[in-house]
Image (spheres, grey):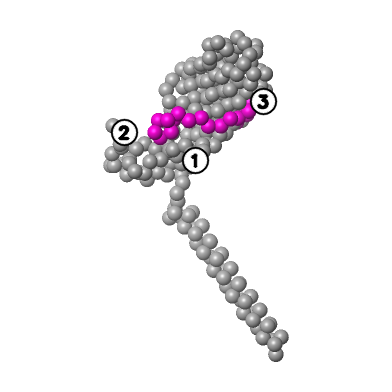
Amino acid sequence: MKRLSILITMLILTVAFLLFAQDAAQTGDQNAQNNDGNNFVTEAITNYLIDDFEFANTWQASMPRDYGVVGIIRREGGPADVIAEGEENNKYILGAKVEYFRTGYPWFSVTPPRPVKIPGYTKEISVWVAGRNHNNRMSFYVYDINGKPQSIGNEPLNFMGWKNITIQVPASIEQEDFRGQVEQGISFMGIHVKVDPRDSYGKYYIYFDQLMAKTDMYLETYREEDDPLDTW
């Protein structure tokens, strides 16, 4: 009798577990359907072109004068993967040449003629780089929503040929302000390269192409058009 009671109890528990699992699965499917049905959509990811360097000669370059000189050039070319994607209008790249006066810990940067405002909430920034297999490291400079300069990334350039370098924008960089109606997002300021002292001699060449941002346009898309911006 006791054995039969145990079997009945186990059967009841099994049935209850199956019913619970079925209900949970249906709830998950319904939530997924709601998300796919745009009932609870919270992201609208878009690829935003910051610069394709077709007018690379408008960019500027700088470095400490006591370490060397840096110049830029607009040249034809580009990574094969970008050309294969159908970027017929992307014919030029940005090149930078550094001539060192002495070894040490120099840096150099290339910057657009003015900061580039990236709409929405930027998730990541990427650029194609031909780094010439030096031990230098690259980062991006941006302005946060309050106009404060920030540096993101510290990516090695010790590779040959073209490589697409992607840097995540950390959550610590402020891009939103829900207290007022202001233009959200960050502004791109330039590319910064820290030179390894072991490679700070002779000449150094580096090339860039297809500078992109992956940005969430959800807040921009659903912002009320008649609500004035607090930008005056």
Asked if residue 150 can be seen in this view, the reply is: yes
Q: What amino acid type is highlighted by mark number 1? A: Ala
- Assess disc 2: are there few (<14), some (14-19) or many (≥20) residues with their C-alpha within 10 Å of its C-alpha: few
Residue at mark 1 to residue at mark 3: CA–CA distance: 28 Å
The residue where tag 3 is placed is 158
Q: Tell me where residue 84 sits by quadrant.
A: top right
Label 3 sits on a secondary structure element that is loop
Residue 202's place in the image compared with 169, above or below, is above
Residue at point 55%, 13% (across, down): 70
The residue where tag 1 is placed is 171
Residue at point 46%, 26% (across, down): 189
Mark 1 or mark 3: name the one nearer the start of the chain.
3
Residue at mark 2 to residue at mark 1: CA–CA distance: 23 Å
The residue where tag 2 is placed is 231
Q: Which residues are magenta?
A: 143-164
Q: What amino acid type is highlighted by mark number 2? A: Thr
Q: Tell me where residue 143 sits by quadrant.
A: top left
